[in-house]
Image (cartoon, helix red, strand yellow):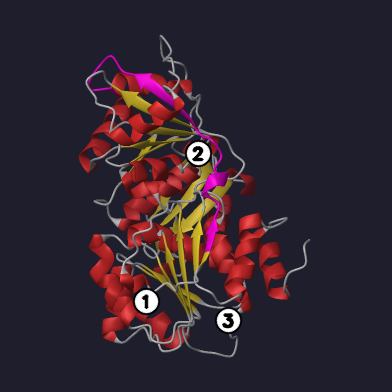
Amino acid sequence: MTTYSQKINQAIEQLGIDKLTAMQQEMLAGVASQSDITLLAPTGSGKTLAFLLPLLNSLDKKSTDVQVLIIAPSRELAIQIASVWEQMKNGFRVTCCYGGHSMSDEKNQLVNLHPSVVVGTPGRILDHLERGFLQTSSVKQVIIDEFDKSLELGFQEQMEQIVDALLVVEQHILVSATDTSDLPAFADMSADAIRVNYLTDQKPLTIYRVDSPEKDKIESLHLLLSSFKGEQAILFCNYRESVERICAQLADHNVASSAYHGGMEQEDRELSLFRFSVGASQLLVSTDLAARGLDIPNVKHIVHYHLPVDGESFTHRNGRTARWESDGAAYLLLHSSERIPDYIQDKLDELGDFPEWKLPEQLLAIPKPAYQVIYVGRGKQHKLSKGDLVGFFCKIGGLKSNDIGRILLLPRVSFVSVKSSSVKQMLRLVQGEKIKGQKTIFKSV
């Protein structure tokens, strides 16, 4: 292993990484210089680790104050960043703050557990600042992830108030997969800021055009999905109503899909992502909410059911596939009445027409999901642990440990991925049984 500081080497080992990329190594040097930094790199290239790892060399273990503030435009991205930090098991506490999360839990962590790093969305961070729960007098580094989104007009007033409260910041780090030269004044980047740009290293993505004879496109979508042979895909729509309608129509065709949009309750959104990530559904149907911040490996296909409104959204949608060394493709599902927007037409003028993806003449068999997700009506608040769930399903439900996949433990409920072949018998055995002395509901969702 390349020689880094002991803290960096330990974190790399915890994450199971053999070596850092050139971008991550450049960020180690850049952050150490204490200069302001703009990091530009494709989605899936390891940007989160690139800005988190260097913090280990600058954090003061003796301090009980917040030293780093990381701002992200969405709760999903904030959760992902905090999760990567926790996976490093570096001894520095992190608190994640976002709407839909318990305000009292966040307050308790901020006031009593003394996190070194705080990650959060602009609105929730500002809320904690105004209530006096978040103290910024010792924040030396501020990181704005997906800064092109965080610095948009809708966030500017909140961001200005947050930045005004950061009085002793020594280093600003802006991170994104798309570039912009139009930064507002409150971004407060120094004139000699370092620019780490790896956007030109993005792996080419194959983009196909798929012609739909019907304006509704659902039958063509079904044919397209059958040609994926069970490989995971994300389908993007422009409207929440379209997400719900398409999921309902696909269910009529026995296609396992998961809806994901901003109008859903947080618990339902987490369930959808969990089902998709464990392979209990082969398709995530989403608005542009899923275009940023999600780190789901092995997504082979991106389907544009509706074309996005701008080129930036197009880039971020496509960035959900072909991540790291993986390959992937995007598909424009189009009816003849749809106009190609200028941001795509410019690509066509430069590169030539997108190759056509021929739909099969008849439906191909879609493999059934290898896993199903089991809902358990108890969670952390009921003193339930992952070990309790595994023990219960093995002892009472007759499962073997390798029948159980990932587990998502939430405050009020839990979700357990179980091999599809074992679900029916297991549910029959656990119905009416108590877990940790508590009766609850067990069902496939």
Query: Which of marks 1 and 2 precedes in the sequence?
Result: 1
Between 239 and 160, the residue placed more toward the observer is 160
Drawn side of residue 327 relative to residue 109, left or right = right
How would you rate the neighbour count of disc 1 (Cα within 10 Å): few for under 14, some for 14-19, many for 20 or more?
few
Residue at x 68% of width, y 56% of height: 17
Query: Residue placed farthest to the front in the image?
Result: 191
The amino acid at mark 1 is Asp
The amino acid at mark 2 is Val
Residue 188 position in % (x across, y down): 38, 74
Residue matched to label 2: 299
- Please say if 70 is above or below 66: above
Residue at x 36% of width, y 46% of height: 312
Residue matched to label 1: 105
Drawn side of residue 265 relative to residue 402, left or right = left
Residue 64 position in % (x across, y down): 51, 89
- Please say if 366 is above or below 235: above
Q: Look at the image and give the residue range highlighted in magenta.
A: 195-217
Between 38 and 281, the residue placed more toward the observer is 38
How would you rate the neighbour count of disc 2 (Cα within 10 Å): few for under 14, some for 14-19, many for 20 or more?
many
Drawn side of residue 195 relative to residue 263, left or right = right
Quadrant of the frame with the C terminus: top left
The amino acid at mark 3 is Leu
Q: Which type of secondary structure does the marked residue at label 2 adopt?
A: loop
Give how far apart the Cα atoms at labels 2 and 1 are: 34 Å
Which label number is shown at residue 59?
3
Give how far apart the Cα atoms at labels 3 and 2 are: 35 Å
How would you rate the neighbour count of disc 3 (Cα within 10 Å): few for under 14, some for 14-19, many for 20 or more?
some
Query: Which of marks 1 and 3 precedes in the sequence?
Result: 3
Count how many numbered circles sit on residues in the image: 3
Contact check, label 2 and label 1, Cβ < 8 Å: no
Between 126 and 445, the residue placed more toward the observer is 126
Residue 316 position in % (x across, y down): 41, 45
